[in-house]
Image (cartoon, rainbow, N blue to C red):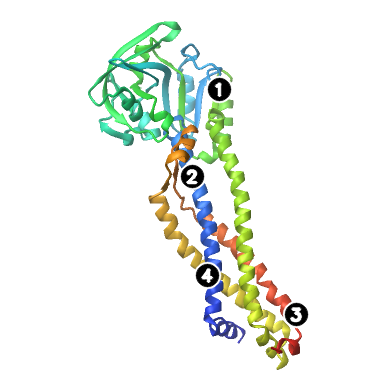
Amino acid sequence: MILKLIWRNLWRNSRRTLITMASIAFAVLFAVLMQSLQNGVFNNLIKNVVGYYSGYVQIHQNGYWDEQILDNSFELKNSLADKLQHNRQVKVIVPRLETFVLASKGNTTKGCMLVGTDAVKENNLTQLKSKLIKGSYFENNEEAVLLAEGLANRLDVSVNDTIVLFGQGFHGGMAAGKYKIKGIIHLASPAMNNAFVYLPLATTQYFLGAENRLTSISLGIDNPENTAVIVQNLRKSIGAKYEVMPWQEMMPDVANHIKADGFSFYIFSGILYLIIGFGLFGTVLMMTTERKYEFGMLIAIGMKKSKLELVLFGETVLITFFGVFLGILLSLPLVIYLKKKPIRFGGELAKAYEQFGFEALFPATVDQHIFITQSLIVLIMAVIIGLYPLWHVSGLNPVKAMKK
């Protein structure tokens, strides 16, 4: 009987019910959209800067990070390789030899980062092959380079052109070599896209006179959320001769930016929930005022206040549930669309983001936990605000309520 009465009351004034449901639905929509964009931006940032090059964990000779020179390189011992290969948390092992060199074509010379790497393993970690926009991918036995798009534009070169690399080799020796450009790649990070040259590892070692030596080993891990635990385990297993660094230590600016934005997210969330709360309360207050005569009449003809409060609470819960469900239905396609076609900014805002080393791209992320969490928060808020009519009825004087 109570359920039947609740249902009839809801649709006796469909306009009022739909207004309340719409308020709750838009509250869920805005909350879900804000957190989905926030998480999407962070994930994209980490993917661009971490997953596209550095890996989540790197291993160096102890002291290399403070003084990044070839003299602080190391040989990959069989003992170290075995320990990494038998670690179940490590999925990809990418040996690299990196140094700064000059790239020259004709009268144009630019500074760049030379990355000597294993072609197959590099592609397994960073999907480098998928970033090709011209030419073809290199192989380990070739003397050919992959050039980042921005650097290629700065040198005014293209596929099949030849560039000259100059640099300082191992133990201070001079390094110079001519290499054919086999492919042009586009890297998401503007800083990387303007400066990177990829060369097969063996060719790089010969070019620099650093046979069998590496400056870093980048690791692909099974679960990025367990990065800290994996780093701790690796430090124990491989000893103090090597430094094991998570991406947060290698790129503190990015990590601090994420922390700062995460803090600001809570501030904006609080403001959003405050606006949502006042909006819902205004709707409930309007609904309660409109039904004041109805409440007084029901109590006057003998309906107990406890039963009336139960009916009102049931109405609140049902309207809230429908509103939350509608909010999820509205937000899901919008979030999916923003994931496939993210927001891209230009102008000064894009330049400001480029200073941090990543593009001004704002995709959304589709995560069921966001929908569940935000829906529950709005649901709890709506139920708490919905207690106001119960408090109003508990102190209602039926005679005064029926006076117009």
In the rendering, at what x and y percent does residue 6 appear? 59, 82
Q: Give the structural element (helix, strand or loop) at label 3.
A: helix
> Dot 3 corresponds to which residue?
394
Q: CA distance from mark 4 to mark 2?
A: 28 Å
Left or right of 258 on screen, residue 211: left
Q: Is residue 221 visible?
A: no
Disc 4 versus disc 1: nearer the observer: 4
Determine which residue is flagged by label 2: 41
Mark 4 lies on residue: 22
Counting every numbered tag in the picture gives 4
**Is disc 2 placed on a helix, strand or loop?**
helix
Image x and y of residue 260, in percent: 60, 40
- Tell me residue 13's x, y (percent): 55, 83
Q: Left of 3 or right of it: where is 214?
A: left
Task: Calculate the distance from the C-alpha at mark 4 to the C-alpha at mark 3.
Answer: 28 Å
Going by the numbered disc 3, the residue's amino acid type is Ser
